[in-house]
Amino acid sequence: MCAIEYYTYEDYLHWEGKWELIEGSPYAMAPSPMRIHQNLSMEIAFRLKEELENKECEECEILSEFDYKISNDTIVRPDVVLTCKETNEHYLTKAPQIIFEVISPSTAKRDEVYKFALYEAEKVQYFALVYPDDLKAKVYKLKDGKYDKEGDFTQEKYLFDGTECDMQIDFKKVFQRYRK
């Protein structure tokens, strides 16, 4: 990616509004996401938090819309993450165990291409792309340094295993409000 101007985390700290910074290039986050986007993000976070409360994983937590500083010129804000053993209060410094991105038309390419490659390079164990229009989640698992598609999930339960705190999510419950 080549930008006319190059920005860093220090610049990012002074910007108003919601932004992401990828390899020095700024990306304005879309205006407030549509209600379905917000509800799906909250539902995913709720389901994961509920699952986390039933486990002995005191060093893990579920966060929404929290900065993940990959480098001095790359800061993203995933919709929902499971992170473990993070000590920084201002931003994530380590790769989360699981990242969920709810797809909006204005951010689809960034999520499906750029963030996919970033999260794969950072060795995020699981990456899930959630499609509100299709009521579907595509789940990818890191295997031998590359993402391998685990499947498309609409009404199934899925176990994110091999993380510091194995988590299960029921996609039927995540999407049920929007099924007719």
Image (spheres, rainbow, N blue to C red):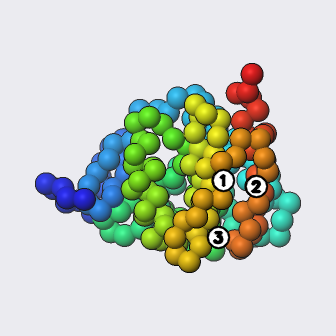
Mark 2 surroundings within 10 Å by alpha-carbon count, few (fewer than 14), some (14 through 19), many (20 or more): some
* N-term mark: 1 or 2: 1
Q: Residue at x 72, y 36 (%)?
A: 175
Mark 3 surroundings within 10 Å by alpha-carbon count, few (fewer than 14), some (14 through 19), many (20 or more): many
In the picture of the structure, the residue carrying the numbered disc 2 is 158
- Asked whether, in this view, residue 178 is left or right of residue 69, the answer is right
- Asked whether, in this view, residue 43 is left or right of residue 130, the answer is right
Where is the N terminus found, in terms of image quarters? bottom left
CA separation, marks 2 and 3?
20 Å
Q: Residue at x 18, y 56 (%)?
A: 3
* N-term mark: 2 or 3: 3
Three-letter amino acid code of the residue under disc 2: Tyr
How many marks the image carries: the answer is: 3
- Asked whether, in this view, residue 142 is left or right of residue 48, the answer is left
Position in image of residue 165 (x %, y %): 74, 69
Q: Are marks 1 and 2 in contact (CB under 8 Å)?
A: yes
* N-term mark: 1 or 3: 3
Three-letter amino acid code of the residue under disc 3: Cys
Judging depth in this view, the residue of 38 and 119 nearest the camera is 119
Three-letter amino acid code of the residue under disc 1: Gly
Quarter of the rendering containing residue 106 = top left
**Circle 1: element type:** strand
Q: Nearer the viewer, mark 1 or mark 3?
A: 1
**Circle 3: element type:** strand
Q: Nearer the viewer, mark 2 or mark 3?
A: 2
Q: Is residue 134 visible?
A: yes
In the picture of the structure, the residue carrying the numbered disc 3 is 84
In the picture of the structure, the residue carrying the numbered disc 1 is 151
CA separation, marks 1 and 3?
25 Å
- The mark found on residue 176 in the picture is none
